[in-house]
Amino acid sequence: MSTSSNVPAGRFALIGSERDVPANAVAAGAPDPSERTSVTVVLRSRKSSSQDAAQALAGVPPSERRYMTREEFAADCGADPADAAAVQRFALDAGLLVVETSLPRRSVVLEGTVAALGAAFGAELVLFRSGDATFRGRTGTLTLPSGLEGVVTGVFGLDERPQARTQFRPSAAAALSYTPPQVAQAYDYPAGLDGAGQAIALIELGGGYKHKDVTTYFARLGITAPKVTAVGVDGAKNAPAGSPDSADGEVLLDIEVAGSIAPGAHIVVYFAPNTDQGFLDAITTAIHDTTNKPNAISISWGGPESTWTAQAMTNFDTAFADAAALGITVTVAAGDNGSSDGVTDGLAHVDFPASSPHVLACGGTALTASGTTIASETTWNDGSSGGATGGGISDVFALPAWQQNAGVPPSVNPGGRIGRGVPDVAGDASPETGYQVLVDGQSTVFGGTSAVAPLWAALVALLNQALGKPVGFLNSFLYAQGEGPFHDITAGNNGAYAAGPGWDACTGLGSPNGAKVLAALASS
């Protein structure tokens, strides 16, 4: 791994870019040096930090907030044209093409051969094999010319290892199942609203949907199908695999949950490759999409914090702060593998990007309900075979100000760190009390915190419609409400953490009472 002692003269090591050998992978030779590929270079903010803007907004009730316009954002928090020009000069000197420059997204996309890109960023690129998959990767730290130190905050695309996983769980034999509107009814979502005038972005890193599935599903529910638009990022597109247990299951679950609860909203599906570059580019594309202008973003993909580079987590979190500054709410699934998050090192882990302090992290419950009556609701934990809600204490992000009084406990890991607590909120996620969906022509039942992110994004669309303005970053407001607008979940555990009164590292503040959330926002 590169260190300050062996960085070539005239260059600097990009902090946080360190990569290790992918887990469960073996080296499989060298990539074709003439193969052409692209990287996304992320730049610093021009004048002010979007984190500062997001923090200032957090202390203001949503009804009184004034969000940045896109023009204001570009001028204050976008990239400096001089920084972009410096990267462009570096690219030309290295024999690379400048494909795209976006000042609002603070990104410059460069294209070149594997050999040229490896040389430009001081990376030795190799092929890795994991199971049946072969992909290009790297180890060590990236380096750049000293003149770009402080200008570049991240470089993505040299390593193409799969970065995230879906957070949905098929049901073997659901004891109970609901349509998404039935779940919304149990949570007393505001009546008489359909999300008209709103746009919900769904981030997808694989799979696709068939229009016939969408039209058939909504016809069966007796609901007018929402407008659904696919947006391709980094060469990806709507590409159904044809099997419900593929990423198609994730895509259709997200569309059908969000779309059936907020059928008047425009559902915009951003497809990107499952790499850290694709994931980040999809998020920033959605945030700065001046055509579709989503005001809620639902993310049902993620992975343990330990599988991410520091530069990735920093730049993702900055992008989510950008969203907050622009009045966009981001909801993220907290994971389906309990307090270990699927890591086998004996420690507790939380899922990222759910652990970002600028998103609403969504945990899972097992719900037994009839109409608006909830008979019981406990922490989702169906055992090792059935999955359990993610949740715990971040090893990366500090305890946010709005969680200071939530009673976030020390981590169960050695050292007892008190950091960002995950999740913030919850909703029905157990496959045994799951959602009725239609995927690739097959009716089935899915659970997982994947369903909870679009469940909350749909509520955001209804709230925005009712209030006539975006609610934006909700965490600080929701934590200030106490138990009022929530069903407090006090039973169950996700492994290392147990549910209890108030906030807990299984179900957060609890599942929503949508009408009470709206009433609290309206009176704030």
Image (cartoon, helix red, strand yellow):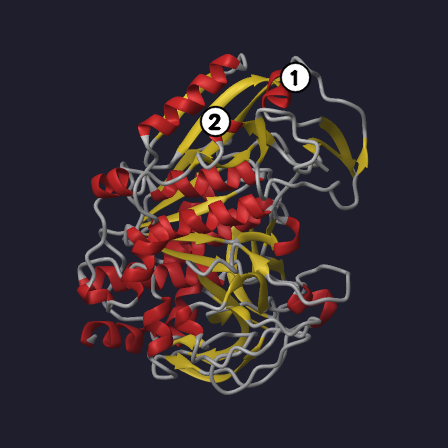
Left or right for 176, reference 136: left
Q: Mark 2 falls on what kind of element? A: helix
Closer mark to the observer between disc 1 and disc 2? 2
- The residue under label 1 is 115
Q: Is residue 108 above or below residue 375?
A: above
Residue 87 position (above or below residue 170): above
Q: How many marks?
A: 2
Q: State how far apart marks 1 and 2 are (Cα).
A: 22 Å
The picture places residue 14, in percent across and down from the top left corner, at: 57, 37
Of the 4 image quadrants, the one containing the N terminus is top right
Regarding mark 1 in the picture, which secondary structure is present there?
A: helix
Q: Nearer the viewer, residue 253 or 29?
A: 29
What kind of residue is marked 1?
Answer: Ala
What is the quadrant of residue 44 in the picture? top left
Cβ atoms at labels 1 and 2 below 8 Å apart: no
Up/down of 422 relative to 377, above or below: above
Residue on which disc 2 sits? 147
Would you call the spot at circle 1 few (<14 residues within 10 Å), some (14-19), or many (20 or more)?
some
Q: What residue is at 37 percent from the left and 82 percent from the top?
A: 482
Give the image location of residue 64, x and y in percent.
18, 65
Q: Is residue 159 left or right of residue 207?
A: right
The quadrant of the rendering that contains the C terminus is bottom left
Q: Provide residue 27's location: percent of width, then percent of height.
A: 81, 32
Kindly tell me whether residue 177 is visible in this rendering: no
Look at 57% across and 24% down and name the residue there: 10
Q: Amino acid at mark 2?
A: Gly
Which residue is depicted at the point 24% across and 72% down? 521
